[in-house]
Image (cartoon, helix red, strand yellow):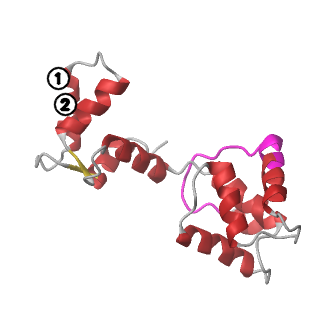
Amino acid sequence: MEMCSLTHFARKQREITDIDKKKFETVYELCDTDKKGYLNREDLKMAVVMLFGYKPSKSETNMLMDQAQAKDSPGVCIEMFMCLMGKKLSSDDHYQQTRQIFNTFDVNCHGFLKLEDFRTAFSRVAPRLPERTVLEAFRLADQDSDGHVSFRDFECVISYGQANS
């Protein structure tokens, strides 16, 4: 388990509880359908879906499988699975959260946000927020004043002040 104890970035860590560990074990057992003692690629993808609610990308699956194969295993053993899923659960992945918020604002899938996107999002989550506040938020995010907020601009605003926390 020592390979999973390294933290490369200063991130907020969530404590892994006994309930979390039991859930990992249960999901592992459910996904090891052939009772072979390891999870293959498809088993691992299903486990991530069951635990985190999304299908991992090919590159994420490759990364997880590569870590298991470094141990000369045909798949992910339960100890490695517990370690990997614990690390995944404990990391507060700020980038992913920011990306999810950005995508929620970007209802038209332009890859950038317009003032209208801000108005729509704020009207849903804070309908009584004054229009002036929405305009100020947009102006703050639109750092180059081109009428478009890129993900990078959005991330900069969302991340403001978090470097020290």
Out of 57 and 16, give the one closest to the viewer.
57
**Is residue 43 at least partly visible in the picture?**
yes
Out of 24 and 36, give the one closest to the viewer.
36
- Is label 1 in contact with label 2 (beta carbons under 8 Å)? yes
Amino acid carrying label 1: it is Arg
Which of the 4 quarters of the picture holds residue 63?
A: bottom right
Which of the 4 quarters of the picture holds residue 72?
A: bottom right
Prevailing secondary structure of the magenta residues: loop
Disc assigned to residue 98? none
**Highlighted range, magenta:** 6-22
* Residue extending farthest top: 128
- Residue 21 among those drawn in magenta: yes
* Residue extending farthest bottom: 72
* Residue extending farthest left: 146
Instruction: Report the residue marked by disc 2.
Output: 136
Q: Quadrant of the N terminus?
A: bottom right
Task: Look at 82% across and 64% down and name the residue there.
Answer: 32
Task: Look at 81% across and 56% down and name the residue there.
Answer: 30
* Picture coordinates of residue 41, whole percent (x, y): 68, 72
Task: Look at 56% across and 50% down and name the residue there.
Answer: 11
For label 2, the SS is helix
For label 1, the SS is helix
Left or right, residue 21 beside residue 152? right
Amino acid carrying label 2: it is Glu
Instruction: Report the residue marked by disc 1.
Output: 132
